[in-house]
Image (cartoon, rainbow, N blue to C red):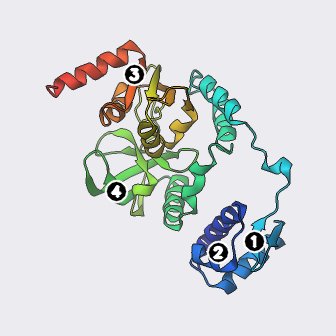
Amino acid sequence: MAPQQKMLRVFKLIRLLKQRPGKTVDQLAQFLEKDKRSVYRYLELLQEVGYEVDSLGSPPRYYLFENETRQQPPFTEEEAQVVRQALAGVSATHPLLAGIRQKLFLSSTLLPLADGLVDIHQGQIVERLAEALRDGRQVRLVGYQSPNSNTVTDRLVEPVSFTDDFSTLNAWEPAAGQEKTFKTRRIEAVAVLDTVCQYRGAGEPLDLFGWAGPQKKIVELSLTHRAYRLLIEDYPLARAYTGKRNDTGFPYFFKGEVRDFRGIGRFVLGIPGEVRIDEPEEFRGYLRGRIGEFGM
């Protein structure tokens, strides 16, 4: 077995053992797609590196023992919401912003965003992209599924960076002459090329929706449950700028910084009736203009 695949299975085992109730060896073997002998080896490995693996009942159900202090999240849900709202008004170039976002990401309310890396295929995709990023090489994204054009094509790009949860690659696409975002889950395979990257970075940072612009604007939206789920699935980092409110029709809200209305506008126009625009009026005007272009 490749070392990375073994590592990813161990990570998946750790997550399974943190769930309650515990899991039997048969259940773990089924989840990991390995035989019981391999599961026992993994359990021994975790104990050797310091994890407290415990069991209860008959047949034994295995779980990770964690004391109450370690189980407490760094933020309560209410505290995390206040911090997320405050961050919406912080400049994207602030030197402390990345560190604060990483701490928020590790909060229990945001931890599910990292679950994608348990998937072995996505882990391999990320590893190849990280290799190209480190060596400054162009890559071909093989079989990339574009939701905008509803096509599957190969894309030649120059990797620039990952989002904190590795769900999205920021990359320069020479054919388009601009920086774009690519979901790692939509990439079938990655071919690292010998061609050295020529792009040296954009002069303007990208917003959560993958668009750059000279000025940042704060957008406030009210979301239905469906709109909220679609938002955090398509743009995982947007979760940090959302929260709950006491509104039956629109129980969630988004308040975040954008640099171009085209990205967030595409999201809103794609789910009519699911989003209420709270601020700013300029964004309402932009949407009215786009609707008018379609003769609606």
Q: Position of residue 80 (x, y in %)?
A: 67, 33
Residue 65 image-quadrant placement? bottom right
Task: Indicate which label's residue lies in the foreground, 4 or 3.
Answer: 3
Q: Please determine whether, in this image, residue 153 is positioned above or below residue 3.
A: above
Q: Which residue is mark 2?
A: 28
3D distance between C-alphas at marks 4 and 3: 32 Å
- Residue at numbered disc 1: 62
Alpha carbons under labels 2 and 1: distance apart: 9 Å
Callout 3–callout 1 Cβ contact below 8 Å: no
Q: Nearer the viewer, residue 173 or 142?
A: 142
Q: Earlier in the sequence, mark 2 or mark 4?
A: 2
Q: Secondary structure at mark 1?
A: strand
Q: Position of residue 147 (x, y in %)?
A: 31, 48
**What residue sits right under mark 3 in the picture?**
277
Three-letter code for the amino acid on which mark 4 is drawn: Tyr
Say the numbered circle drawn on residue 182: none
Say whether disc 2 or disc 3 marks the residue closer to the N-terminus: 2
Quarter of the picture containing the C terminus is top left
Q: Tell which circle, 2 or 1, labels the residue nearer the N-terminal end.
A: 2
